[in-house]
Amino acid sequence: MQAISDGTRWMLRLDQGQDLFPALSTFARDHSIRAAVVVSGVGMLKDAVIGYWNGSEYVQKTLPEPHEVVGLHGSLAEAEGPSVHLHVALAAPDHTLVGGHLMRGTVWILNEIFVDTFPGRTWARPMDETLGLRKLDLEPNRMATG
């Protein structure tokens, strides 16, 4: 992976064969990033798994063949280590588009990803038992008011 920053903004290049989620987690850990937005991403993924939340669970679809990443965005937070939440739009060789919650994927050829960080902040992703999902908390250390 190559990573370059101009302060709060980072441009990343991930290379073929890298597992996207561990690569982004390592990037966040190595640069002490605890609050960030994945603004955009392009490239290709193979062995992608996307999910659709049906209200109680993710219905998953596996895409073993390479697909073009035509849109990638999400957030980086802290949940006992880096927590990566991504959504993706993927184009198949026949130009059909599929997308949803990205659950895993392996970089095919390369990925170019733009990340904007919030230095000095920590976002959390605690479990919301009423939803059955981890929900982004932008102020995890705020004091409860009575």
Image (cartoon, grey):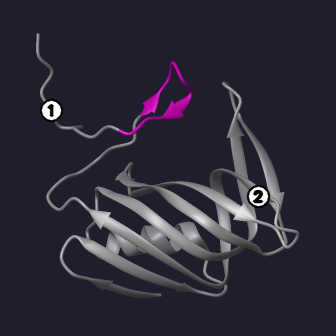
Find numbered disc 1 in the image and state the secondary structure of the residue it sits on.
loop
- Asked if the magenta segment contains residue 133, the reply would be yes
User: Residue 14 at x, y = what percent?
Assistant: 53, 83
User: Residue 69 at x, y = what percent?
Assistant: 65, 69
Question: Is 21 in front, or is 10?
Answer: 10
Q: In the image, what residue type sits under mark 1?
A: Arg
Q: Is residue 140 left or right of residue 47?
A: left
Residue range highlighted in magenta: 127-136
Q: Residue at x 71, y 73 (%)?
A: 68
Q: Is residue 108 left or right of residue 132?
A: right
Q: In the image, what residue type sits under mark 2?
A: Leu
Mark 2 Cα shell of 10 Å, populated few (<14), some (14-19), many (≥20): some
* Residue 97 falls in image quadrant: bottom right
Residue furthest to the right in view is 94
User: Residue 145 at x, y = what percent?
Assistant: 11, 16
What mark, if any, has residue 142 been given in the picture?
1
User: Residue 20 at x, y = what percent?
Assistant: 58, 71
- Asked if the magenta segment contains residue 111, the reply would be no
